[in-house]
Amino acid sequence: MGSVEVFILGQRYIIKGDEDPEYIKKLAEYVDAKLKEVHNSMPGITPLKASILASLSIADDMHKIKLRYNSVSERIKNIEDRADSIIKLFD
């Protein structure tokens, strides 16, 4: 298990984990960007409220990606089913 130093909203954090350090840094950069986005749109917001709103924004991103993934997966399954039907015609 390694550790990585990251900065989120100017605060230093040491993150320990088994993931690649560059991956952890990318995650921290993403969280930092979301927090800055919220903080810049509402300059007087407390860090706790900014964190909650950023978390909701991240959850929204994840949910939309999950919906797209499920839609694409369903399309792929339909294509595979059709391909199997066509292949059976030639057997």
Image: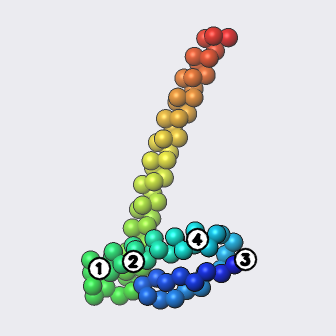
Query: At 27% across and 85% down in the image, what residue appears?
Result: 43
Q: Which residue is mark 1?
A: 40
Mark 1 surroundings within 10 Å by alpha-carbon count, few (fewer than 14), some (14 through 19), many (20 or more): few
Q: Position of residue 21 (x, y in %)?
A: 62, 73
Q: Is residue 21 visible?
A: yes
> CA–CA distance between discs 4 and 1?
26 Å
Q: Residues within 10 Å of mark 2 (few under 14, many from 20)?
A: many
Q: Quadrant of residue 47?
A: bottom left
- Residue 89: x and y in percent read 61, 11
Q: Quadrant of residue 81?
A: top right
Kind of residue at disc 2:
Leu
Q: At 45% from the left edge and 65% from the top edge, which residue is drawn?
A: 59
Depicted 53 relative to depicted 74: above or below: below
Measured Cα–Cα span from mark 4 to mark 2: 20 Å
Q: Which mark is first along the chain, 3 or 1?
A: 3
Residues at badges 4 and 1 in contact (C-beta under 8 Å)? no
In terms of sequence position, does the residue under pointer 4 or pointer 3 come before the other?
3
Inspect this view and state whether residue 52 appears: no
Q: Which residue is denoted by mark 4 in the rendering?
A: 22
Which residue has dot 2 on it? 35
Image quadrant occupied by the C terminus: top right
Q: In front: mark 4 or mark 3? A: 4
Whether residue 85 is situated above or below residue 35 in the rendered picture: above
What kind of element bears circle 2? Answer: helix
User: Which residue corresponds to mark 3?
Assistant: 1
Amino acid type indicated by mark 3 = Met
| Left or right of 60, for residue 91 | right
C-alpha gap between disc 1 and disc 3: 35 Å
